[in-house]
Image (cartoon, rainbow, N blue to C red):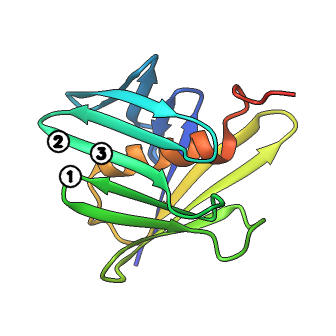
Amino acid sequence: MTAHTYSWVGDTLYDDRRHPIATVAGSQLTVGDTTYCITKTGGRDFRLRADGGGVTFIFTTASLTTNRLEAMCGSRHYILRRPRPWNPARTITTRDGTNYGTITRTFSPRSGATIKAELTNADIPNAHLAFLAYGCKLVDADTTNIKI
């Protein structure tokens, strides 16, 4: 099975051929012709919500830590789990155990933190992938909300 890789670069999600899949501007996530209005709450009870195209997506922490995240994209329930607390990769599964691949945070001094999604199962809509990857970007790689 061929894996497909997607990467957030700035505010744009690209596929492995560098075609833009989604963009984020302010409080809007745009995937194809659909724009989703985004609201989020930070802190320990992180929550991200996107409404658009007649559907609602919700992304939340599912435990006291961020090791397990859950998302509802329309009627599909996703679980994003790290196998170990400091592991940068999250597996993407559904409640029935279907595995879609991984979303991984990488870091380099030059480009900072980036999010890459590697899908081994192509049966995931672009809107779901963009929302899941954006949620992981906010939880795992966002440095704009750090308070010292």
Among numbered discs 2 and 1, the one appearing first in the sequence: 2
Classify mark 2: helix, strand or loop: strand
Q: Position of residue 45 (x, y in %)?
A: 55, 47
Q: Is residue 37 above or below residue 58?
A: above
Q: Is residue 142 above or below residue 46?
A: above
Q: What residue is rendered at 83% in x and 43% in y?
A: 108
Residue 105 vs residue 128: left or right? right
How many angstroms separate mark 1 from mark 3 (CA)? 6 Å
Q: Position of residue 89 (x, y in %)?
A: 64, 64
Q: What residue is rendered at 84% in x and 33% in y?
A: 110
Task: Kindly identify which residue carries mark 3.
Answer: 57
Q: Nearer the viewer, residue 141 or 109?
A: 141
Indicate which disc residue 61 carries. Answer: none
Q: Amino acid at mark 2?
A: Val
Q: Position of residue 15 (x, y in %)?
A: 44, 46
Q: Is residue 48 above or below residue 119?
A: above
Residue 11 vs residue 145: left or right? left
Determine which quarter of the picture holds residue 86: bottom right
Q: Amino acid at mark 3?
A: Phe
Q: Amino acid at mark 1?
A: Gly
Residue 77 vs residue 20: left or right? left
Q: What residue is rendered at 47% in x and 32% in y?
A: 40
Q: Are marks 2 and 3 in contact (CB under 8 Å)?
A: yes
Task: Kindly identify which residue carries mark 1.
Answer: 74
Among numbered discs 1 and 3, the one appearing first in the sequence: 3
How many angstroms separate mark 2 from mark 3 (CA)? 7 Å
Classify mark 3: helix, strand or loop: strand
Which quadrant is the C terminus positioned in?
top right
Indicate which disc residue 55 carries. Answer: 2
